[in-house]
Amino acid sequence: MSPAPGTLALPPLPRLPVAVPRSGVSIEARRALRQLLGDIDRALATAFRDGADASALARRRGDSVVSLVAHVWMACLGEVAGTALFAVGGFGRGLLFPYSDVDLLALVTAPQPARLRALEQFFATLWDVGLKVGHAVREPAQCRELAARDASVFTSLLDARRLAGDPAFDAQLRAIVDDPALWPPHEYLAARLAERDARHARYDDTAYNLEPNLKDGPGGLRTLDSLRWMGRRLAHADDLSEMVAEGLLDPAEQAQLEQSEATLRRYRYALHLEAGRAEERLLFDYQRGLATRLGFEDEHAKNLGVEQFMQGYYRAASQVDRLGVQVAERFEEMLEPVGERQPVGDEFERVGPRLAARDPQLFVRRPAALVEIFIARLDQPGVLGFGADTMRRIHQATDAHGEALARDDEVLAAFLRLLRRGAPAVEALWRMNRHGLLAAILPAFGKVFGRMQYDLFHVYTVDEHTLRVLRNVARFADPAARGEFPLGCEIWAKLPKPEVLLLAALFHDIAKGRGGDHSVLGEQDAREFCTRLGLPPGDVERIAWLVRHHLLMSTTAQRQDITDPDVVHRFADVVGDREQLGQLYLLTIADIIGTSPRLWNGWKDRLLADLYTSTRYALRSDVELPRDAGVRVRECCDHALARLMNDGFAETDIARVWADFPQLSFLRHRPEQIAWQTAAILRAQGALPLVAVQPLSVRGSTELFVYTPDRDGLFATVTAVLDRLRFSVMESRILSSSTGMALDTFLLLEADSQQPASAARADELQQRLHRALAQSVGVQPSKRGMSRHLKHFQMTPKISFHAAGGRTQLALVGTDRPGLLAAVAQVMLGEDVRVHDARIATFGERVEDFFQLTDRHDAPLDASRQERLLQALLARIGPARD
């Protein structure tokens, strides 16, 4: 049995010989000190692996470095008046993690050249012995001047402690930090909160990023430091226990902060050792190694050890973040003048800009008031938050009632009243989550709290993703969003019961991490909870259906050909009615954007809108979509012809071009695309190869059209050029005319921004591809290594073959990587395989591509050729290769 953390004996402090003042440190002595520091660090690392407490180890390392620094100071400067050395930053607080900087401040009066040379020698020696030193040399007046201008400099002095030198400087530094004229309470609090907001904005204002920063991110160790700084400056409370005495924390909150701090320090200590440097980000590169180092093991495929490890971080960071916000609000309230009391209903009151409960025992006596106060806040414009005592009582009552809240009919009735507020309810749900109230009412939500999704598809944890999906849903009610989501806003305005969509969003991922299909398990959870909530049976079933099928629209649009009426009709048959279609459309958009903002682009917007429009048409009771191919071709031709003739083209010229178009062109392209392609051919007047690029097409992406005599290797050449220019292929149509002309269409986005190309980039693509097609030698794709992120999510590609009429369909499911499509095209060319159609879909780090193939005689691939192609693809794009 391993000893409990903190019970192990720590490595002893170093025993150093007495330094001879101002004798300097010889090369041999520097080597010895470097060896000593290495021995100390190795002993501390061993103690950590054996289970010693990280805080105690960081403090022991800090004490050890103090001894070493003091020894070098004496050797370089001796006991000299008018000069002193102070530790600042984390070192000033007595903590040094394995690779933390050693921050030092040297104070001098009337600095003389000899003194400055001695200080220069001192700092150089510290670097030579292996310390990473950050230092400043200042006079006290300079310190005061800088501290008056910059709150961060002032804050650094709060942690300063003298290590060596003239003790007279202690009083001078204390005079600076105690001066009421420097950063008075209101100004200091405003500066600290502004710094917090700016710092958090760098991390998307959430502690739930998949590669969080342990130190500076929301809920990180800097939040705890900031609480102590504010306590010291605003309430003369030097630590958490003194903040309890001042009423800024209660003992339970102090215990939560101390426990969370211990977790964060343990993770930070392990991270430094794992990275071998001062790394503060829990990068994918280190997460699995850290999970193993700290003893986390896989339970099953949906609850990996690394996910449990990260969940420990998220729980600690969320506690720190929540209490950090609440304590900051308590400081604000402490500094506010006492406001006038105004009644808000029978049980609440407004005190200045804050809402409070009249009866201190209200939330214990009547649990439904826990939800009602959040509803009341929605009706009070200008309210900044809850009073400090009320916030504390909300949290205490939530803990006291626990999951009994989920079975309380009055609580559930109040929760339903909140949801029926529609979009405004979302902000209340965010606040309830911060207090732990949402997880108490909905225990299944508490189970995904901090649940990491170990992939590159999801940017946030499950709970954070869910809350962001809810916020995205609420955007459809905002008139300002109409420009970005015109169809979404129109659908939202017609929803008879917005609570149905809010509950579907709340439950859509709630069953992740349990080991089964989260859509099926979530459907069961939604049905049970919504029944307890007292919703009508029809609403219960609709919510359950939306949860069960929340991925249906996205997968249909991206994996199937939605220009095929049969695909649309199958989708419409599952959806059932237009109201459900609208709800699914809104949930799909909110889910994609909430998964990762980078996943949303104009191409997906257009794709989903097209599927919505065609499905809505199919669901009209009095209209049946024309399934006959001839009817669809005629409709497309009529619309395209009208556009072309309006642009001045002769009908006879148009007919001549179309006589060579395969019927599939009119079945698979929109009339606008047919008109654009036809116009490009007519304007070219027979010049080949023809390369046309439309920067922003009707499909919401950049459209590339290649018209040239068909030849083997054409697809490989085009994809190689696109790869070299860093374009992502979203979709491609590879068609051939009866006279042997290739009519190839590619829908593209910029690989880096996932946005359509600019006019300049479109011109560059047109010129580069035209030159490449005019050459007899094919273009090879560029060689680029995988990103740091992608290397951690490699999987062996899954490749399968299926008969598809007179062709062979190849399905490729694997990990995305730079140049993947170009590499696949090169392999197919090398294996004498022709590509006739390609359907490209990317989901985070996962690709799902489908190709229609034949051999060079346009026959389906036989078994032996399929096997050769399979082995060649695995050799080229397997996970072991860059």
Image (cartoon, rainbow, N blue to C red):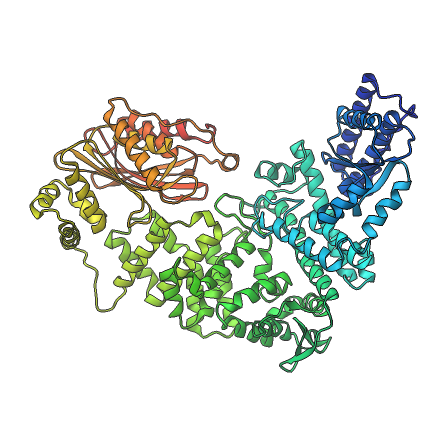
Q: Is residue 173 left or right of residue 875?
A: right
Query: Residue 410: x and y, percent?
Result: 59, 77
Q: Is residue 776 left or right of residue 418?
A: left
Front residue of 417 and 560:
417
Q: Is residue 746 left or right of residue 464?
A: left
Q: Is residue 877 visible?
A: yes
Query: Residue 335: x and y, percent?
Result: 74, 64
Front residue of 688 and 597:
688
Number of labelled discs? 0
Query: Residue 533: x and y, percent?
Result: 52, 72
Q: Quadrant of residue 382?
A: bottom right
- The residue positioned 76% from the left and 60% from the top of the image is 252
Front residue of 319 and 574:
319
- The residue positioned 24% from the left and 22% from the top of the image is 776
Considering every residue shown, the one lying at the far left of the view is 652
Considering every residue shown, the one lying at the far bottom of the view is 346
Q: Quadrant of residue 690?
A: top left
Q: Is residue 419 left or right of residue 324?
A: left
Query: Residue 300: x and y, percent?
Result: 56, 45
User: Does residue 48 lie above or below 129 as drawn?
Assistant: below
Q: Quadrant of the N terminus?
A: top right
- The residue positioned 81% from the left and 37% from the top of the image is 62
Q: Is residue 511 visible?
A: no
Front residue of 59 and 632:
59
